[in-house]
Image (cartoon, coloured by chain):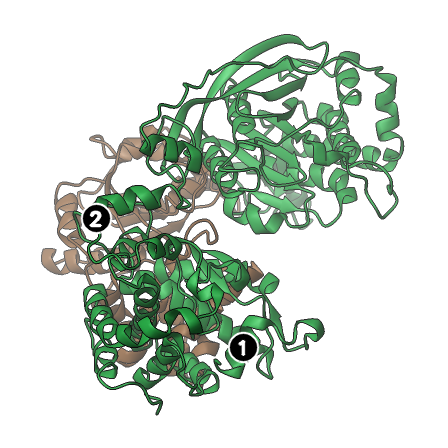
Chain colours: A brown, B green
Amino acid sequence: MPTSSEVPCEEHVFEAEPFYLPVKDEVELFEAAYKARLPVNLKGPTGCGKTRFLEYMCWRLGKEGGFEIPLITVACHEDLTAGDLVGRYLLHGEETVWVDGPLAAAVKQGAVCYLDEVVEARKDTMVLIHPLADHRRMLPLEKKGTFIRANPNFLLVVSYNPGYQSMLKDMKFSTRQRFAAIDFGYPQRELETRIIAGEAGVDNDIAEKLALLGERSRNVGETALEEGPSTRLLIYAARLMAQGVEPRRACETAIVLPVSDDPVVQQVLRDLAATVFPQP
Amino acid sequence: MTSPLNLAIYKNYYDNAARESAVTFEEAKDCFPLFAKGLSEKYLHAKTLEEAPDYLANVFRPFPFSNGREIYLPAIFDVFESRDDNWRAYRVYTAVQAGQWEAGSFDRPARALIDRDEPLAWIASFLGTFAIPVLATDIFITLENIRISTQMARRFAGFASDLAYFLQRLGSPVEPFNHRLILWNLFFAAMGFSFAVPAGILEHAVSLKREGAGLKESLQATGAIYDKLEPGCKSRFSPFMPADMREVGGFPRDIMRLAGSDKVNQRQYFEDSLADLDFYSYPVAAGSGEFVTKKILGDRLNGNVEPKRQAEATITGSGGCVDATLFSYPEWDYLAQGYRKGWVTVLEYSPQRSDPEKAGNLLREWDDLVREVIRQFRMLRFQERAWRKRLEWGEEIDIDQAVASDVERRGGLPGSDKVYMERRRVSRNVSALFLLDLSASTSSAIDEGAHRGESVLEVLLAGTAIMARALGQLGDRYGIYGFSGYGRNGVELLRLKSLNENLSNDVWGRISGLDPMRSTRMGAAIRHAHHLLGRETAPLKIMIILSDGYPQDFDYGEDRADREYGLHDTAKALREVEADCIVPFCLTVDAAGNDYLRRMCPPHGYMVLKSVEDLPAQLPKVYIRLREL
């Protein structure tokens, strides 16, 4: 019977190679940044492979270095406080004990700490990472009156989606300018075809059609669609098809409905799917 | 004659008694331009077949031919039994026309001496060199239909099945008594149907179906087929051709003037034909100049110098205006893809006051709503200032609760775990500006509901007045401005309440004294509101635009009916606002607002109200939502 397992965040390591196909020179750039211990900002639309890329890099760098590099991910949100990242005092029985937050744990252990969608976090919280993201590489623990010097293997990585964020949630310049940035976009059709086929286990014809649909749906553009279907959604559609769902129906479920609530835009996506996939 | 199905599509046989399965142009016109953009990356405006020039769409062709900016669709598709199939036919029509961009129908030689922004200009020049340009045009479009349909079907499997379904029902051989009917048969023969065509032309058409066939091959095939068909057409052209085929609209009419010349002087052709073409501002460099009308273009071509425009600010404003200041703003010309610098003059002034007591009348029928909105805003303010205590998890230990809990436990009671506190939302510093459309159309009366007989403007003002009353509870800084005007040198911004002003009797007097004015040059008004909000220091700045229709002015585009220029300029102004960390939001009472607001405003940056009466209740909700960003 299948079982689940609970793993502490700081033990999240990759033993098997995560599936990732490079789009440009992002692998080499990230390796160079890691060796120089430069914090990295991954910019790109949702579902284009930022997280997978980071998983792959943790695996790859760990393999090259002969040691495991855990990946600690924090999904940022507007109520994320400094305590959530760094740690806090908790009442434990008769005592008050300090509990490290994920960032402090990563700094101590030499993990890669990934702050996903960093602009969602409050700006005052983000200022906390400044000493970690420059030459000091240290994390002040204000409430303890101490600071942690980062483990040499520690790396801070943030991600955000420039298209999706409103200007109100843009990164502060003082934060932005502490990171080397790698730009991600959706892959070209040929590469996206290989990714879909590799991830979903569908044949090349279906993967090619889905990549074509993705490309054309993204053409609909910002006037109608906040964001076109991501590679992730195309993979979902492919997986549904692999389970025997009729292609247009799979596109409806995995692409049309998730991408937009606007009936006109939904119909446009439906028509594009019908143009790519023949009627059964 | 052509096939019965095509005749039905063009002549709307069923338009008087459309069945439930029918799909109308009104239903399709929002979707298919976006669908075309998906296929071709170009937004192509939807027009009906009736609006298309004859040389681009006529009943003798299986598909219309796009001019590169528009797609032509039937006013109604009621030819198939199911609604899905009728919708499918619209999809095929759009895909074939959008496919022209995909297949390179508008390609042109790199050094073509033709205006680069007119997609069909170079093709027109080529076809104009034939002795019978109408014949050459018809051949070319038929061949392009073959080439494009094949290429699209090769690339899109779904389109291939849609096309096959449609053509099987559309195709029936016709008696080839003129060249257009020969070409009808040629199209279907090339697409694999057993239709008879004159010897020596089918192979040229079929050659365009091979992979890699481009515009050049299509033009070569046009020449080859033309040479075969021309001798037969020369004898039959005049007596048998219907009038509308001899005198077709648009460029072939100009080309017709050249019919019979063996040698065409290209330069002469362009000079003759440009003046009649529907050219629009393309020769004007971005950021300067003005619209090039046919007359001005004609004068230029004839060497006449047009009088220099006097940029005069002739505004006097409504009677009794005070504190008037003139501002100059650029305007976005989407066709030239650049700004017209200093193009619009905006006059900001405080309008004449009316009796402030009249303001009471504005809100008389909205008492309950006023109370409710004030209550909501008061609560909001209270919430924003509160720390959240007694939490099971939080940023800080709540010492009072921790001590109390410890005391309880020492006393043998189960102590509470709620010993943390968290500061979530603190009070916010907000500046807001309300921009009211005061155009003439706001004078129209509401024809249903509890406020029947009141004008749209009265309800707009009531909504604004409710907000003015309630905003005092939140302590936000806010301003209220109205806008209207006439012409690019006559945009008026009426200062009803500036951002620095308190809600005084003067303000109520200005609000209650407003009357509908003239046009809606929205881009300039937004840029001025942007300027006003730009001076604010609040971290959150909100601009709410209340309108009753699309941007419009007599010189806001090529003509008064041109919506595109105004939409693009307003959209650009809204993007400028967003880029400056100001949150814009458009609230319209125009039921057709979805059509253009989707294109004009940021996603989630607009709302269309079904009823004007909803505005006073919706406006506070919108404001609260924006404030929480």
- In this rendering, would B254 be left or right of B25? left
Label 2 marks a residue whose chain is B
- Dots 1 and 2 on the same chain: yes
- In this rendering, would B581 be left or right of B610? left
Report which residue position mark 1 lands on.
Answer: B7
Q: Position of residue B482 (x, y in %)?
A: 66, 25
Q: Earlier in the sequence, mark 1 or mark 2?
A: 1
Report which residue position mark 2 lands on.
Answer: B265
Q: Position of residue B542 (x, y in %)?
A: 57, 30
At 35% from the left and 70% from the top, the residue drawn is A235
Mark 2 surroundings: few (<14), some (14-19) or many (≥20) residues within 10 A: few
Residue B357 quadrant: top right
At 23% from the left and 44% from the top, the residue drawn is B267
The disc at residue B49 is none
Helix, strand or loop for disc 2: loop
* Circle 1: residue type: Leu
